[in-house]
Image: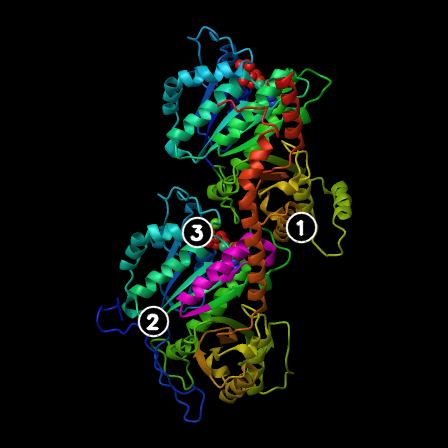
């Protein structure tokens, strides 16, 4: 899929920068440089390596309250400024070649004043100027951040989900290491996010690609995302040269009396591992409405039967009837990767907790 | 034959000239040349199968598919064929908001919508087709996806309006393991196919699933098996310049057998020719019905039996067939007329119908003797039943999910007491 990337706020800009770096260092082309980075805080732009200068957009610098130095977490003020400067924000969209794109990702930290306040305004603006699906890649804050961050996130979540076509979430709380400061972990967390997002949305955009037998077309991915709501990503990989220890584990996993080849067993196990991996947003998988699974690796190891059974297992596991599966051949790769997208998950303990904490802050 | 002239043709499909079974007392068949076909592959599976048909034809010196056309909504899939010429590949829906040249995401309604929107373009693709010397049209498609299953029936409907020639469907049913959504697509599409085509030849992916393959090898083997069967069957008959063989199959017999409408299944068996002896040699298949001392006639009967008892393109109750037809294809010196006649009589019993035709398809240089059996309008096909119940379950689940979607999302993002307000 070809998609433009629009980062809003610190988290959003850093993530877009990260994703673009991955693109530039790979043989894939998905954004083709169609990126924008919006922030109210100009110091963020200095930390960006891949997003070119002419794509840095400073929001609200003429407004006294902001003045180019951030929102201090005031989400309502940020949203109000963005609404006021709507036309200027719109104008920047002209830099994106939307005709060449299949979708747009607006990327933001939901707890930030900018990400949470300006982000939804941009999503709404994009929906009004473009027919493309406008997806959100959003980051949920940790519990340790202060109450107003949680409140921002809970409130902006409503706006993102309502105005965006689908919101993929990454939960910092589940992923960060409490032992060290969150800000020091941004780049490692962002690597994980970029990897997972691209494993699904950039599959099939390899320039030297052999045509996959079972390719996931852009329409396939869009169909899974069509549900709207909140979505989450799983991932697992394995080194193809290191099968011995793996197999003991696999045998144990699938001791169902059936005779499958070791390749088939390996693929099934890997899909299972991806589906049961720590998701970007942990949730009850059976609450998902649609799912998608991508297998990527050397074609000679991609057992059809194994993949079919794995897909079927996932359909039963998620209790849904729309589970699309596709492959991405990488003939010279020495690893196998499986990515899973759970679209429209509705039982999400982390969101329940976030709302509770937000209500506490709001009512205290 | 050509475009339907506005006045001369009655609205009903003209009955193909009928006559008594080929193998009968008076013997000699009134040979028409073998069938000439226009073939259209729709969607990914449909196109791949068409490509394999063209390959088989090329490899075996047959000349069945006079026209080949591939139609798809996915640009990448249209790059795959080896035998469909570049200029005979049509991309539809590239301006459709939900397709844009990258498929329809397995949505049969979008598949149908795209084909309706681009019907002019599809019609134009037929302008190039010299339909004059075509006896029938064959449309191949996989029914589990969105393009073949959705666009297929729209194209067929259009072909039926444009031409008098029968339009046959060659459709692939998705495997059970593909899950609920493909089953629902297929069950819906099957209805449209069967009501709009003159005959629907079904292929059941479940029955043909092979072991130990990679995704890349994918459907390759199955598609070759299917191509062998369909081309051997439909191409049977006098070649333009060969001498008239006594029992030669002719295209009108095949069309007559297909005339039943409904769903049909094909069986097949072959045996390598032992060149030294010029007789039937070792059988290739898994079963050896008879010992080496058997006569040629017995061997041919055995071969036909094996074809019927083999894995059919869609497993079915043989006795539920309405009509049947046997083609024996191979070097003429291996034909044994008595064998074919007794095979025909045997099949009459098995299929419980008197409408069983049988004929030869002489191929001087063939290295195999093969028997193809067409079971036309079979009404007992367990897989179709199963597919339908799978589809009903899927439909209910999808409906149930649709019904609660908005509310569940709303509940997820809002708090019970509505203390939290959105930002915008
Ligand atoms: N994973 C990840 N999370 C981040 C990153 N930066 C910030 N966050 C999270 O996102 C939330 C919002 O932070 P920022 O994006 O810096 O805030 P902002 O949108 O710039 O808004 P203000 O600075 O308040 O105007 C924080 O509370 C963190 O939880 C990042 O680079 N990676
Ligand atoms: N026998 C066979 N079946 C296939 C092949 N490719 C796909 N299928 C089946 O056809 C269905 C439709 O898939 P596809 O043709 O890719 O979808 P479409 O392009 O949207 O029509 C799938 O659900 C499978 O059951 C193939 O090459 N051979
Ligand atoms: Mg900031
Ligand atoms: Mg497809």
| Residue on which disc 3 sits | B109
Res. B166 image quadrant: bottom left
Which of pointers 3 and 2 lies earlier in the amino acid sequence? 3
Q: For the magenta stretch, what is the residue range? A: B172-200
Q: Residue sitting at 44 percent across and 53 percent down? A: B147
User: SS at mark 2?
Assistant: loop
Give percent across and percent down for residue A316.
Answer: 65, 49
Q: Is residue A65 above or below residue B386?
A: above
Left or right relative to A360: residue B50: left
Residue A256 screen position, x and y as percent:
75, 54
State the separation of the CA atoms marked 3 and 2.
31 Å
C-beta proximity under 8 Å, tags 3 and 2: no
Mark 3 or 1, which is nearer the eye?
A: 3
Q: Are the two marked residues, 3 and 1, in contact with CB atoms closer than 8 angstroms? A: no
- Which chain letter matches label 1? A
Q: Are marks 3 and 1 on the same chain?
A: no
| Rendered position, B134 above or below A80 | below
Question: Is B186 part of what is drawn in magenta?
Answer: yes
Question: What mark, if any, has residue B135 been given in the picture?
Answer: 2
Instruction: Answer whether residue B255 is visible to the viewer in this image.
Output: yes
Tell me the crowding category of disc 2: few under 14, some 14 to 19, or many 20 or more residues within 10 angstroms, Cα based. Answer: many
Q: CA distance from mark 2 to mark 1?
A: 45 Å
Q: Is residue A261 above or below residue A338?
A: below
Q: Could you say whether the residue bearing mark 1 is in a helix, strand or loop?
A: helix
Asked if the residue at label 1 sits under 8 Å from ligand 2, the reply is: no
């Amino acid at each position: 899929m070809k998609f433009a990337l629009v980062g809003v706020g610190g988290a959003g800009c850093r993530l877009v920068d990260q994703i673009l770096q991955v693109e530039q260092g790979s043989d894939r082309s998905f954004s083709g440089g169609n990126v924008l980075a919006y922030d109210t805080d100009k110091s963020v732009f200095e930390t960006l390596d891949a997003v070119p200068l002419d794509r840095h957009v400073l929001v609200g610098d003429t407004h006294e309250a902001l003045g180019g130095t951030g929102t201090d977490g005031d989400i309502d003020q940020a949203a109000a400024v963005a609404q006021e400067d709507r036309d200027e924000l719109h104008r920047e969209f002209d830099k994106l070649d939307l005709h060449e794109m299949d979708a747009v990702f607006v990327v933001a930290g939901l707890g930030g004043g900018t990400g949470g306040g300006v982000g939804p305004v941009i999503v709404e603006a994009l929906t009004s100027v473009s027919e493309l699906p406008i997806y959100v890649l959003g980051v949920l804050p940790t519990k340790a951040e202060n109450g107003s961050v949680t409140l921002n996130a809970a409130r902006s979540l409503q706006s993102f989900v309502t105005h965006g076509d689908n919101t993929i979430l990454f939960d910092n709380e589940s992923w960060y290491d409490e032992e060290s400061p969150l800000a020091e972990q941004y780049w490692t967390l962002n690597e994980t996010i970029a990897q997972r997002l691209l494993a699904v949305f950039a599959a099939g955009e390899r320039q030297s690609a052999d045509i996959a037998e079972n390719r996931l077309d852009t329409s396939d991915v869009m169909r899974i995302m069509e549900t709207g709501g909140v979505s989450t990503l799983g991932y697992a990989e394995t080194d193809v040269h290191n099968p011995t220890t793996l197999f003991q584990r696999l045998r144990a996993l699938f001791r169902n009396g059936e005779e499958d080849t070791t390749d088939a067993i390996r693929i099934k196990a890997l899909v299972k591992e991806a589906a049961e991996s720590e998701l970007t947003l942990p949730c009850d998988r059976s609450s998902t409405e649609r799912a998608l699974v991508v297998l990527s690796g050397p074609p000679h190891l991609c057992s059809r039967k194994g993949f079919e059974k794995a897909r079927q297992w996932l359909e039963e596991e998620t209790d849904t009837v729309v589970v699309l599966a596709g492959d991405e051949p990488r003939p010279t790769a020495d690893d196998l990767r499986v990515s899973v997208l759970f679209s429209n998950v509705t039982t999400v303990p982390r969101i329940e907790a976030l709302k509770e904490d937000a209500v506490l802050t709001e009512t205290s | 034959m050509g475009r339907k002239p506005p006045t001369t043709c009655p609205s009903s499909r003209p009955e193909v000239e009928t006559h008594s079974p080929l193998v009968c007392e008076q013997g000699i068949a009134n040979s028409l040349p073998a069938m000439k076909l226009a073939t259209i592959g729709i969607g990914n599976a449909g196109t791949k199968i068409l490509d394999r048909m063209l390959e088989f034809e090329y490899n075996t010196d047959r000349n069945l598919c006079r026209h080949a056309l591939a139609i798809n909504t996915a640009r990448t899939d249209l790059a795959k064929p080896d035998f469909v010429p570049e200029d005979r590949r049509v991309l539809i829906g590239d301006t459709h908001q939900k397709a844009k040249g990258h498929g329809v995401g397995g949505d049969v309604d979008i598949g149908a919508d795209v084909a309706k929107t681009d019907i002019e373009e599809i019609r134009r693709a037929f302008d190039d087709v010299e339909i004059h010397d075509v006896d029938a049209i064959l449309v191949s498609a996989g029914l589990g996806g969105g393009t073949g299953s959705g666009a297929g029936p729209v194209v067929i409907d259009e072909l039926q309006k444009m031409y008098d020639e029968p339009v046959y469907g060659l459709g692939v049913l998705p495997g059970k393991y593909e899950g609920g959504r493909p089953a629902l697509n297929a069950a819906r599409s099957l209805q449209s196919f069967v009501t709009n085509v003159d005959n629907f030849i079904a292929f059941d992916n479940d029955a043909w699933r092979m072991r130990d393959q990679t995704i890349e090898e994918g459907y390759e083997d199955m598609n070759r098996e299917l191509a062998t069967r369909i081309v051997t069957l439909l191409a049977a008959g006098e070649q333009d310049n060969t001498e008239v063989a006594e029992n030669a199959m002719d295209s009108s017999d095949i069309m007559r057998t297909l005339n039943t409408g409904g769903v049909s299944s094909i069986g097949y068996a072959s045996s390598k020719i032992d060149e030294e002896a010029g007789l039937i040699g070792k059988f290739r298949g898994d079963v050896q019905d008879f010992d080496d001392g058997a006569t040629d006639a017995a061997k041919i009967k055995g071969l036909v039996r094996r074809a019927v008892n083999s894995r059919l393109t869609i497993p079915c109750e043989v006795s539920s067939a309405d009509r049947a037809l046997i083609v024996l294809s191979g070097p003429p010196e291996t034909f044994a007329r008595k064998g074919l006649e007794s095979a025909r009589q045997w099949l009459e019993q098995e299929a419980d119908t008197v409408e069983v035709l049988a004929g030869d398809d002489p191929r001087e240089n063939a290295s195999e003797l093969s028997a193809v059996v067409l079971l036309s309008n079979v009404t007992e096909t367990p897989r179709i039943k199963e597919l339908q119940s799978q589809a009903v379950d899927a439909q209910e689940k999808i409906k149930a999910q649709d019904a609660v979607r908005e509310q569940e999302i709303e509940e997820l993002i809002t708090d019970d007491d509505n203390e939290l307000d959105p930002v915008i």
